[in-house]
Image (cartoon, rainbow, N blue to C red):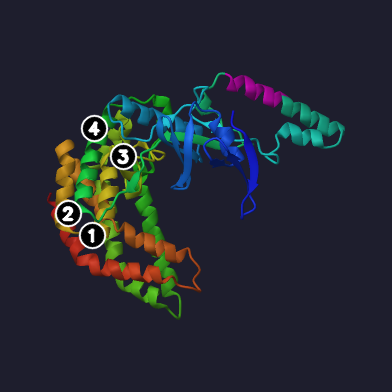
Amino acid sequence: MIFLSASYDKQGLYYYMARAGGMILEEKWEEVLEQYDLKVKRISWARGAKLLETDHGFFQLKQFIGKPRQLALEHAVTSGLVKQGYQLVDHILKTKDGMLFAKGSIRKYGRKSNKQIIEERGNSVREEIEGSNVMLEEKREQSQSDKKEWWQLPFPDNCDIYVIRKWFPGEEGNFRNAEFLKRAAAALGKLHNAMEIVEVPEELAIFHPSMALLETWQKHNRELKRIRRYILNKKQKNEFEILFLSMEGGYFDTARNACHLLEQGNCRQLFLEAAKQQKFCHGSYNYHNLLDSRMGLATVCFENAGIGVPVFDLYQMMRKLLEKNRWEKGLAIDVLREYEKQRRLDKRERELLYIMLLYPEKFWKVSNHYYNSRKSWINKIDIVKLEELGRQQSKRQETLEYLRNY
């Protein structure tokens, strides 16, 4: 048994010193860890979460913000990948009770139930009737909830939810390193092959937001028109606004063209097939979620996984690496070749990849950030990003033209 003694830090929070092993824990972390069959040797911070060094290797302890169904889907995907032999993923560790999550300590001032609210009111006849109705409704809900799976019920609202996942200590990916990018592309091809075999219960399936890509782009285009009207109506225009108006016409035409190609092209069928065949994508395949560990290149953060076209992951990766490497055509070719060594792209997937990269996502993001920020103070970084987009435009067009005929 570990003897705990209270200590006080500079920020005014109470921590606890575990004399056996010299660990410093907050009380809430101690309560969470007791729900797992782990012997923790050391704890540190990493990526906004607790990194645990244990007798079974490294794990990450992190608060879960989301719905139970998403957590159940994440577990189904990652555990399925592990069964297929794809070990380098941050699969979820179950508690001693076989649950995918642990509950934190109950908050003293959490939300009150309807029953509690009714009881705290007076003893008037009306309140007694309302209280009776609420109690009957709660009993009815309880009887219905007994027939439901845990992921069909909401998390309790009077405590925080925590999840422990397998972790791989290592550096985040470097998207300016050509050799790393080739490895990342090959790993993505292998991941997609494995995900095609993973079986996920139909009732857990969740559509990734990319399945509504056309609707998302159309919304972005309306926002760009709104920003343009706002700037045109201003009498005095600042440096960012003048630069925006000089670039907006070309980018807006490109955005409309991308929407037209997506709506009319053969690649649209890929979304219907993904829904029908339950194809999954990682949903956030970028350098933040690739860890170069001693065991190999690990893929983490499957919280956004869902039904979607696999090529969306490849698009996310390629858009980031091309923006960071000034749309270097040779690099794009190398990455595509490494991916296709593991998983071949068909004609429709190549078309979809081109259309996705054609849409000026970066221009929309910078413009949207300006529009939703304080107009009295213009962020210089937004101006720098727009200027960089202008410098990269010719290289971007050259690379996109090659990918259109790839």
Residue 288: within the magenta? no
Image disc number at residue 308? none
How far apart marks 4 and 1 lie (CA) works out to 28 Å
- Relative vertical location of residue 140 with respect to residue 59 in this rendering, above or below: above
Give the Cα separation between the discs numbered 2 and 4.
23 Å
- Name the secondary structure under disc 3: strand
Range of magenta residues: 136-146
Q: Quadrant of residue 183?
A: top left
Q: Is residue 195 left or right of residue 204?
A: left
The earlier-in-sequence mark between 4 and 1 is 4
* Residue hosting label 1: 325
Give the camera-side residue of 136 and 161.
Answer: 161
Q: What is the crowding at mark 4: few (fewer than 14 residues within 10 Å), some, or many (at least 20)?
A: some
Q: Name the amino acid, label 3.
A: Ala
| Residue marked by disc 4 | 193
Image depth: mark 4 or mark 1 in front: 1
Amino acid type, residue under disc 4 in the picture: Asn
Residue with the mark numbered 2: 331
Residue in front for this viewpoint, 197 or 6: 6
Residue name at image x 27 percent, y 59 percent = 324
Q: CA distance from mark 1 to mark 2?
A: 8 Å
Which is nearer the N-term, disc 3 or disc 2?
Answer: 3
Q: Earlier in the sequence, mark 1 or mark 2?
A: 1
- Image side of residue 123 versus residue 69, left or right: right
Up the image or down, 368 lies above or below 347; here it is below
Instruction: Please tell me whether residue 142 belongs to the stretch shown in magenta.
Output: yes
Disc 1, disc 2: CB below 8 Å? Answer: yes
In the depicted view, which residue is nearer to us: 275 or 312? 312
